[in-house]
Image (cartoon, rainbow, N blue to C red):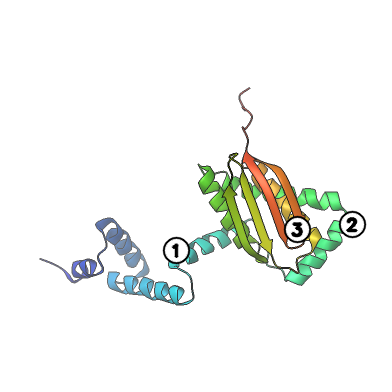
Amino acid sequence: MSTPESDKRRTVNINDKIAEELNRIANQEGKTLYSLINEIAVIGIDAYRRGFPLKDAVETRVFLDRVKRSRMLLVNQDLWYTASGIAYRKDRDGWLNKAYEKAKWYGRLLSEESSDDSFTESLRKMLYNLFWDCNEVQVRKNSEDAFDLRVFFIPEMPLQHASVVLRMVEGLLNSSGYAILRHAAEQGYLTILFKRVPLPDMQQ
């Protein structure tokens, strides 16, 4: 004999494992399976109408939670450019080295990726999501097994800030087992050629 809940499962065509997990979540939330599925559907439709799929919304929330736990703060763009410029002019090497060291933490997240393809895609998403003054990030593999990274920022981004971001990207790459072969920093634009390098044998 079918039950109202099992009828609803067949109606939305979900497999048993997903249905069991949704049932568990619904019970924890004090909801019916139908109301939970309806709530998820409404959120998904709203996300789609706003121009992004629900998967992107979830990934962005997970990313922002990671960023928050790493002590990142949202700062006004003009204020950040001004403060960064002052620090850069006062102690260029010290400021760039600090940017490099702080970026290593994010490199540990990227180093969990098992392949070059997954790494470069995670790198692309991280740069695009982390720097809100970034308009586009492109990563392409060339014939020499190296990767060409191009990052396009807003035109107002100062040149010294591009140098700071370049140093941060270097920290990300180095802590993930990649080395920069060539690079160029211009106002609002970065281009970096990087390649995976053998990590030293820690047992030797």
Question: Marks 2 and 1, Cα distance to the nearest angstrom?
Answer: 43 Å
The residue indicated by pointer 1 is 55
Q: In screen coordinates, is 4 left or right of 199? A: left
Q: Position of residue 46 (x, y in %)?
A: 44, 76
Q: In screen coordinates, is 43 left or right of 120? A: left
Question: Is 185 in front, or is 57?
Answer: 185
Outermost residue, right direction?
Answer: 90
Mark 2 or mark 3, which has the lower sequence index? 2
Identify which residue is drawn at 67% across, 42% down.
174
Question: Marks 1 and 3, Cα distance to the nearest angstrom?
Answer: 31 Å
The residue indicated by pointer 2 is 90
Circle 2: residue type: Lys
Q: For the C terminus, which image quadrant?
A: top right
Circle 1: residue type: Lys
The residue indicated by pointer 3 is 162
Q: Position of residue 196 (x, y in %)?
A: 61, 38
Identify which residue is drawn at 82% across, 67% down.
82
Identify which residue is drawn at 80% across, 60% down.
159
Can residue 187 be seen in this snapshot? yes
Q: Position of residue 202 (x, y in %)?
A: 62, 28
Circle 3: residue type: Ala
Q: Residues within 10 Å of mark 1 (few under 14, many from 20)?
A: few
Mark 2 or mark 1, which has the lower sequence index? 1
Which quadrant of the figure has residue 85? bottom right
Viewer-nearest of discs 1 and 3: 3
- Please tell me whether mark 3 sits on a helix, a strand or a loop: helix
Contact between labelled residues 3 and 2, with CB atoms less than 8 Å apart:
no
Which quadrant of the figure has residue 7? bottom left
Viewer-nearest of discs 2 and 3: 3
Q: Residues within 10 Å of mark 3 (few under 14, many from 20)?
A: many
Q: Residues within 10 Å of mark 2 (few under 14, many from 20)?
A: few
